[in-house]
Amino acid sequence: MKMNKKKTLQKSVVSNGGIYAITYFFVLLFVVMVGYYVHFMVFESKDVINNSYNKRQDLLAESVVRGKIYGAGKEVLAETKTRGDGTEYRYYPYGAVFCHVVGRSEHGKTGIELSENFNLLTCSNKSIGTLWNELNNKKNPGDSVVTTLDVDLQKAAYEALGNRKGAVVALEPSTGKVLAMVSKKDYDPNEVSENWESLTEDADKESRLMNRATQFTYPPGSTFKLLTALEYVRENKKYEDFTFDCDGQEIFSGVKINCYHGSEHGKVDLKKALAKSCNGAFAKIGTELNFKKFRKLCNSFGFNTELPTDLVHTNSTFALKASSKKEEMPQTAIGQGDTLITPLHNAMIAATIANKGVMMEPYVVDHLETEEEEIVSQKEPVEAGRILKEKEAKQLTDWMKNVVDKGTASALSDFDYSVAGKTGSAEFDSKKSSHAWFIGFAPADHPKIAIAVIVEGAGSGSEYAVPVAKKLFKNYLGN
Ligand SMILES: [Zn+2]
């Protein structure tokens, strides 16, 4: 019987070809439409909703009260409040302290307000209460974002930078959690509308709206000597035999290199050259390195490509390549030349050495939760890869400890725990003005925090970046 029925069906397909063609057409159309709808929901809706100029977001905001943004200890960093007349506004209890990393929600969303816009406008609580609200046109609470940010550390970094321009990034080396991210100049996100004209007018001079920690690139100065030293180690088995006699200035490949303020460091090996940040020794090393291999090493650390993170950032650049002229190497080896790096990236380099050679992807959102504190999604740390061997990381750590014990960061040697670090004074104009850098981590043997500090146009790293670093370590780890 079954067989017969099938035959009959097949017959009718043939005899009613025209009708079936039309039916197929509509079925196909339907499938395409469903397919597009599913594709939109899965892949595109987030982008569409995240687009600040899109009306859809306004529609969502009509049915959902924008969720809160919290610090790691559940301190409120951003919340939506309602005025007497029923209109909503976004309130930032810490004013300017978190303005770049948390961002703003007016005049173009930025920071977490932008990256988590979709989640902040989504209510994942599907209880009878929220359903009831929907039926009665009452707003439901959006999901909250709980960040990795340590509020006390952020405040300490903010205060330590004072009135100077610059940036601080602090990471947890074992996870990639962003513990603090400060950029100055800053602005109060509570007063963006009132001050919008002056904020955009002074953009060229102060760049208050820009997040220097992720968007500005600077010459790395002597912090880069860590990578130069690593490349030298890789190319020379007998790297411990390296010596250089420094008399303050010398010409390498036709380029005159001075040590900071003409200091004469005398006879140095690699360890001492790093501790004293001897430009001569590293320029000499530069003349001996293989350009192609050096570029490969820098690229493996994240130069010339996107960094492994969801944080919006500018790429760092390492310009030297196989065809570069040999005159470019002495400057490049000491972190000058055309090399440029973001403070975030420099903190990642410190964190990678601290984490025994494995780079972790930096992230700032720990988890999403409903207003009832039910977890919606939890971020797990992600390894970006092993960048250096454990043995190499240990060697660099030992040298960085020596920078603190006997070198340019000795102001950090009086803690109960040991600190590993490297200072830098990156010259950026012909008048020898310099940005003050420090990168490092502590405790050196069991690192809990890795940092990068840059103070723009201040002077030497020892004098201006190390004191900022000291306040951070003290705040996070105590004395
Ligand atoms: Zn020197």
Image: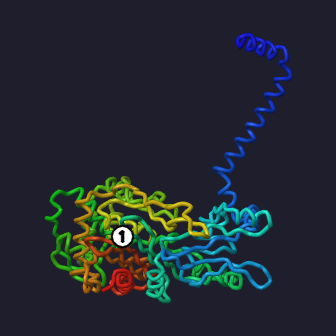
Residue 283 lies, with reference to residue 235, above or below; the image says: below
Q: How is the image coloured?
A: rainbow
Q: Position of residue 115 (x, y in %)?
A: 59, 65
Taking the spot 30% from the left edge, 86% from the top edge, the residue there is: 479
The front one of 13 and 48 is: 13
**Residue 212 visible somewhere in the drawing:** yes
The front one of 378 and 421 is: 378
Q: Quadrant of ligand 1?
A: bottom left
Residue 321 lies, with reference to residue 371, above or below; the image says: above
Q: Position of residue 210 (x, y in %)?
A: 57, 75
Q: Which amino acid type is marked by label 1?
A: Gly
Taking the spot 77% from the left edge, 79% from the top edge, the residue there is: 87
Q: Which residue is mark 1?
A: 335
Q: Is residue 88 left or right of residue 466?
A: right
Numbered circles on residues, count: 1
**Residue 250 visible somewhere in the drawing:** no
Name the residue at the left extreme: 241
Residue 358 lies, with reference to residue 468, above or below; the image says: above
The front one of 470 and 240 is: 470
Taking the spot 30% from the left edge, 69% from the top edge, the residue there is: 225
